[in-house]
Image: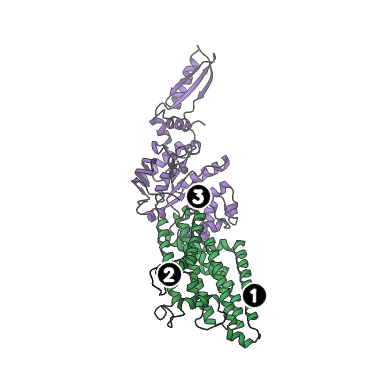
Amino acid sequence: MSALAAVFQNLNPVLDRELRQRSRSARSIVMMSLLLTALAGVLYIAHLAMTDNNQFGDPLSAISTGTGAVMYEWVLFAELALLLLIIPGISASAISGERDRQTLVTLQVTLMGRVSIFFGKVAASSAFVLLLLIASTPLLAVPFLVGGVGLGRILMGFVVTLCTGVIYATLGVACSAVFRRTQTATLLTYVMVFAAVAGSIVVLVVLAVIQTAQGDFTDPSRVSLYANPFVGVADAAGELNRGFDFPGPFSAIKQSMWGEQLDGGTSGVVPNWATALIVQAAIAGAWVVAALRRLRLPQREVD
Amino acid sequence: MSLDPGGPGSDGMTTVTELEQLVVDADPIIQARGLTKRYGNLTALNEFTLDIPRGSIYGIIGPNGAGKSTAFSILATLLKPTSGTARVCGADPTKAPRSVRKHMGYMPDVMGVYERLTVAEYLQFHAAAYKVPRTDWPELVHGLLQLVDLDVKADALVDRLSRGMKQRLSLARAMVHDPDLLILDEPASGLDPRARIEFRELLVALQEMGKTVLISSHILAELQRMCTDIAVIEAGNLLAAGSPKAILEQLGNGRRVKVTFEDRSVEEFSVTDLADQAALLRRLVMNNDREVVEFTEVATDLEGLFLQITQGIVQ
Ligand SMILES: Nc1ncnc2c1ncn2[C@@H]1O[C@H](COP(=O)(O)OP(=O)(O)O)[C@@H](O)[C@H]1O
Ligand SMILES: [Mg+2]
């Protein structure tokens, strides 16, 4: 952690200070331990389920049925779900917390500028997401050793999950700049995460209902699902058309999203996971614009 | 708490500053012109027009809610005025806040504190935020901590400091980029008398370093001894401005003395200055008709004056 801090030290004063403060807090260690414990539990349960299913206990059959792949998908799925629960909590107090502690004004009258302050905060929250992901890599190594999942796929899942985490951390920091109170900012970030996960599906269902009512029985547009964080990671971490009797969650999502299309959705031009990240980043970007406007000085009211 | 024009303090300091002003710079470091801030129907600051000369310790006095923090926030590039303009350190705080910040240090009325950060790190962080080169930090931090008498606390955690220490650290923070102007919003409020005296000494040291200090308070006693200039503000309106002495003169009837005679009768006399007061005393003592038992000054110090002004007795 301190080596990492040294690298970032010259980049941004806010980032440097936040890393310093965090390294002295027990909170991040506790959070990391809880996450790893939960993921280890998921890994164990997935393993039990898969070995029960693999009646012959044959290591070769483990590879053919993709035991490792399914374990990997469940661990990453759980990790993404937990990250989406953790991130609003750590990022949505970034700026409103300084307001509460009366430290924002003294930071704003320096020569740092609102953009540096904002992205220093984003980097600090993102660094924590990165730390959590790195800490959980040993748990992803287990499915790799079990077999049935390649290193490239694990790496892709890692990168897209990290990017997704950074996007929602940015969203949280932006909310904490826009809203004066930490509770409001945190609540709104959770609402937006929920909207991205559940709302994108609701939109699809509503579209389907409307189309059916109009006598149109073709598949409704799935474009709203690109805003869903699980869909983006599914494209990177899941697999199409393997015909497992027991697909992992990401492969299941990927199959239902792009399974019918032989070319696999938009890929060829831009990979699906990239489209999903771009859609989500655009939503967060709108909030970033609002946040930077809110941080501009002088203001009509002092924070 | 009487004003002592003969004593060491405000009088001698005024002369030095006035001289310096003439020699060094006739251009005021702050020029406020008709600054007005409205929140809905409430006028927090009304047509605030004031020049702050370079090298002065300028005190703004007013009760809570008078508009001191509002005026300071505008000058410190934080708040947009409803109307009016200002120049601070040669730039417009609304249009060119960055150029103002380079030369201005601001200490807000509430000192915010970071958790899990040491005193030295706190200053280093702000030095970085003010773009002070990293190689200069050790010397800078050492010098500032010595100035505010916190060098033994360099490795202490900021949130463990006493209120007086936090206040001094906050002042050191406002000085990391060696500004010409310091804007200090009620820095002495909530300090015990001893910490207040220490803070006052610190301000005098700052003036000797050639800094201009703009400071506010709702307690007169804090400011009258150390300020070269004073402005009185109430309900957003500037009521009087000038040297403490000039304000007294501007408002007339200088000093008042209360004389108690042998027969318990009490009379008040107006005197223009100390010599006049001595002459009065001589006259009364020479007068054998009535013996003087007690001879006291009535509170015509700034505190009394302040009460008079803000109660609308004198305007
Ligand atoms: N954001 C705000 N919204 C509405 N009224 C405000 C706001 N900030 C300050 N005021 C009002 O403006 C007046 C001046 O406040 P302030 O400048 O803080 O006074 P002081 O610093 O002299 O105590 C007060 O009446 C205060 O209630
Ligand atoms: Mg105030």
Badge 2 amino acid: Ala
**Label 2, label 1: how far apart the Cα atoms are:** 38 Å
Q: Residues within 10 Å of mark 1 (few under 14, many from 20)?
A: some
Vertical placement of residue B226 versus A58, above or below: above
Tell me the SS state at disc 1.
Answer: helix
Q: Residue at x 51, y 72 (%)?
A: A161
- Residue B199 percent across, percent down from the top left: 53, 44
- The answer to whether any part of residue A248 appears in the image is yes
Residue position for label 1: A44
The circle on residue A208 is: 2
**Label 3, label 2: how far apart the Cα atoms are:** 64 Å
Q: Are marks 3 and 1 in contact (CB under 8 Å)?
A: no
Label 1 chain ID: A
- Residue B2 percent across, percent down from the top left: 50, 30
- Residue A60 percent across, percent down from the top left: 62, 88
Chain B drawn colour: purple
Viewer-nearest of discs 3 and 1: 1
Badge 1 amino acid: Tyr
- Chain colored green: A
- The answer to whether any part of residue A10 appears in the image is no
Whichever of callouts 2 and 1 sits on the residue coming sooner in the sequence is: 1
Residue position for label 3: B171
Label 2 chain ID: A
**Label 3, label 1: how far apart the Cα atoms are:** 56 Å
Q: Residues within 10 Å of mark 2 (few under 14, many from 20)?
A: some
- Camera-nearest residue between A57 and A204: A204
- Camera-nearest residue between A75 and B219: A75
Viewer-nearest of discs 2 and 1: 2
Tell me the SS state at disc 2.
Answer: helix
Q: Quadrant of ligand 1?
A: top left
Tell me the SS state at disc 3.
Answer: helix
